[in-house]
Image (cartoon, helix red, strand yellow):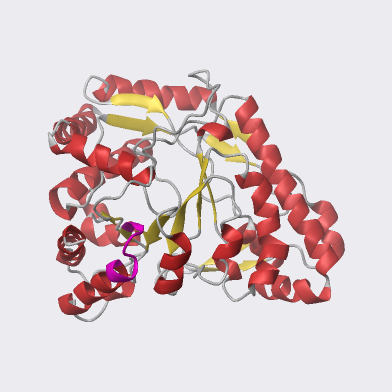
């Protein structure tokens, strides 16, 4: 990066530091600590533009050409944009996290993707075509590039380390659910039929994926590559990790263990599977993995109301996703005040031909009324377009905050 590009980063980091010093951050932080400990309080409002960032902060708004610096610029600009426009309950900290630079060997068989230009959609060729192909699978191995990771830490520290705390922190996964891995390897149609045609073979596949995931977790833990996620860390499918319950007893202050962290799994691809088959072919293999973690989150877009009695078997379960397709009354009754009711509003409301504010307000009031007595968070995510009107997600957040204040 040249001097001009470094100055861009430094200016952005300085603005983030100003935001982090704002008096309201302490109150927001306390809100999250109380929320994650299941204390009654204001429903939390979050907005994650995700795919919609391409309209809020298009590539043309970025000034840095260096790939690493450009990614940092985008992250800093998103933080600033969120503070200045979205007005949700996110906490801004005077920190900048550098994840480990690493490669993953995969499961031993290549999954070939054919991509098109339509928002990144793709087709893939599942490599496990015959039952005997399972013999070709191998446990994944993660290789961390310590030198490159340290180079990035030092570079960020050199540019803006006096403004923001630069540290190594980040996850090697989003979900530990394994179902997407199974479907990439086998194909969704084949895997659905395998439950009936070759159930013992499918149990063998899921056992292998479970054992490989545990091997990966063991390796990361042994080598000291796990990092805590108990502060302004994204956990589950929408939420932040602020908690004083982690790390667990015995943490040495240096090497995080799974027991010191939030865990997360989901089974979105099993949305049309019965609760019994979900438990037999999916959940029973996720359970040993999630049992390793200090606190757990479960679910994403799949409606969980028919299988919450199964999901609640997870040890130290704390956050449960309530998707737009979930029966709110059943979810509220099952979750009560014992779990976080992590509601995901339907993002289609922000992608309609026109934004219907009355419909947005009615939908939010409906969920809050249904979830009275629950520990509610409302997280707008999975957006891909605001129809060129960035004000839409700002308006959603404003309406959500108005509704939340009334409960």
Q: Which residue is nearer to you in this view: 299 or 134?
A: 299
User: Split into 4 quadrants, where in the image is the C terminus?
Assistant: bottom left
Q: Is residue 367 left or right of residue 135?
A: left
Q: Position of residue 321 (x, y in %)?
A: 44, 60
Q: How many marks?
A: 0
The answer to whether residue 31 is magenta is no
Residue 172 percent across, percent down from the top left: 53, 40
Residue 171 position, x and y percent, is 49, 39
- In the image: residue 17, left or right of residue 220: left
Q: Residue furthest right?
A: 132
The N terminus appears in which quarter of the rendering? top left
Q: Position of residue 350 (x, y in %)?
A: 25, 72
- Residue at 70% across / 56% down in the picture? 284
* Left or right relative to 10: residue 309: right
Residue positioned 61% across, 67% down in the render? 124
User: Is residue 373 highlighted in magenta?
Assistant: yes
Regarding residue 65, the answer to whether it shows in the image is no
> Residue at horizontal 20%, vertical 65%?
396
Residue 278 can be seen, yes or no: yes
Which residue shows up at 17% across the image and 58% down it? 405
The answer to which image quadrant residue 226 occupies is: top right
Which sits in the foreground, 141 or 328?
A: 328
Extreme residue toward the bottom, this view: 353
Quadrant of the rendered structure where residue 273 is?
Answer: bottom right
Looking at the rendering, the stretch of residues picked out in magenta corresponds to 368-377
Q: Tell me: 348 left or right of 85.
A: right
Please say if 15 is above or below 363: above
Say above or below: 389 vs 94.
below
**Which one is in front, 324 or 348?**
324
């Amino acid at each position: 990066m040249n001097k001009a590009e470094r100055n861009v980063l430094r200016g952005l980091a300085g603005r983030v530091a100003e935001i982090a010093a704002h008096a309201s951050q302490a109150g927001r932080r306390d809100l999250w600590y109380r929320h994650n400990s299941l204390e009654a309080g204001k429903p939390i409002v979050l907005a994650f533009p995700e795919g919609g960032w391409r309209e809020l902060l298009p590539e043309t708004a970025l000034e840095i050409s260096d790939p690493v610096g450009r990614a940092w610029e985008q992250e800093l600009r998103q933080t600033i944009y969120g503070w200045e426009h979205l007005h949700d309950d996110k906490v801004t900290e005077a920190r900048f996290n550098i994840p480990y630079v690493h490669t993953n060997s995969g499961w031993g068989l290549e999954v070939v993707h054919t991509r098109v230009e339509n928002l990144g959609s793709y087709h893939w060729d599942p490599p496990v075509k015959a039952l005997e192909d399972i013999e070709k699978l191998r446990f994944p191995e993660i290789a961390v590039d310590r030198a490159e990771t340290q180079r990035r830490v030092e570079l960020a520290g050199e540019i803006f380390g006096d403004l923001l705390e630069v540290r190594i922190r980040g996850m090697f996964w989003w979900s530990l659910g394994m179902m997407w891995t199974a479907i990439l390897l086998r194909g969704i149609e084949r895997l659905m039929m395998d439950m009936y045609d070759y159930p013992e073979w499918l149990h063998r596949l899921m056992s292998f994926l479970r054992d490989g995931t545990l091997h990966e977790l063991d390796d990361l833990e042994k080598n000291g590559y796990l990092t805590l996620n108990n502060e302004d860390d994204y956990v589950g499918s929408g939420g932040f990790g602020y908690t004083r319950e982690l790390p667990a007893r015995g943490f040495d202050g240096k090497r995080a263990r799974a027991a010191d962290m939030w865990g997360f799994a989901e089974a979105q691809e099993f949305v049309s599977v019965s609760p019994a088959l979900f438990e037999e072919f999916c959940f029973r293999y996720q359970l040993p993995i999630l049992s390793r973690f200090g606190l757990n989150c479960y679910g994403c877009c799949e409606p969980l109301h028919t299988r919450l009695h199964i999901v609640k078997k997870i040890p130290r379960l704390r956050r449960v996703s309530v998707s737009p397709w979930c029966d709110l009354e059943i979810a509220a009754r099952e979750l009560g005040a014992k779990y976080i009711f992590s509601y995901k509003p339907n993002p289609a409301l922000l992608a309609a031909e026109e934004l219907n504010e009355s419909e947005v307000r009615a939908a939010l009031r409906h969920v809050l009324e249904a979830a009275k007595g629950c520990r509610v968070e409302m997280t707008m995510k999975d957006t891909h377009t605001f129809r060129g009107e960035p004000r839409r997600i700002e308006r959603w957040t404003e309406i959500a905050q108005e509704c939340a204040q009334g409960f």
